[in-house]
Image: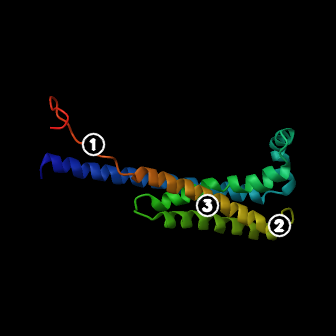
Amino acid sequence: MTSRSRGSDQGSADSGDRTGKILRVWWFVAAVSVLWLLWMTQRPQHVVVADLAPLTEMANEHGISTHMLISIIGNVVVFVPLGLAVARSLALGRDASAGTVLLGGTVAGALVSASIELLQSVSTSRFTDWRDLALNTLGALLGAVVAALLIRSGRRPQRSRPQTWVGQEDGG
């Protein structure tokens, strides 16, 4: 084996190790997202309202209602990281289609949201709402779309330019 092919094999192994590390980071982000979502959504309603008071007061001062901020925007935004992380994890190291990436990130968000709503249905201090499930799933979809766009931008073929040599004239 020549030193050139050994270097190539080493580069391939280093690339695989790096991909594996990045993959673990994305799955870690997904797991942390799920744990945070479970923690945030299973606390008593009055505690969550008190914790979010500074944010809702500031929004109200700018004409944004608490319902718009928390129930609509909040339910979408908090699921974006989960959809993004799951979609990136599914695509990393594979040649996954955009559809697979979008579906995986979205379904993961929908399943986590459905689990949250199920847990809230047996809680005396929380309540369920099908709109939360829909908005959470939308957030996961948006995160998956971001992941698909990142993947697509990374796969764009480089435009090849004709090589010119020092001293070579254009056209010949």
Is label 2 in a helix, a strand or a loop?
A: loop
Disc 3 versus disc 2: distance between alpha carbons? 27 Å
Return the residue at label 1. Answer: 161
Q: Amino acid at mark 3?
A: Leu
Q: How far across and how far down the image is residue 79, in percent?
A: 66, 56
Compared across the picture, whether 70 is left or right of 17 comes to right
Is label 1 in a helix, a strand or a loop?
A: loop
Residue found farthest to the top: 167
Frontmost residue, 96 versus 38:
96
Disc 1 versus disc 3: distance between alpha carbons? 37 Å
Residue found farthest to the left: 2
Q: Are marks 3 and 2 in contact (CB under 8 Å)?
A: no
Return the residue at label 2. Answer: 123
Q: Which color scheme does this rendered protein use?
A: rainbow
Q: Specify the quadrant that holds the C terminus.
A: top left
Q: Amino acid at mark 1?
A: Arg
Sequence-earlier tag: 1 or 3: 3
Return the residue at label 3. Answer: 141
**Residue drawn at the location 22% of the way across and 50% of the way down:** 8
Residue 120 visible:
yes
Sequence-earlier tag: 3 or 2: 2
Q: Are marks 1 and 3 in contact (CB under 8 Å)?
A: no
Q: How far across and how far down the image is residue 22, in percent?
A: 45, 51
Q: Residues within 10 Å of mark 2 (few under 14, many from 20)?
A: some
Q: How far across and how far down the image is residue 154, in percent?
A: 42, 50
Frontmost residue, 113 versus 164:
164
Q: Amino acid at mark 2?
A: Ser
Q: Quadrant of residue 141?
A: bottom right
Is label 3 in a helix, a strand or a loop?
A: helix
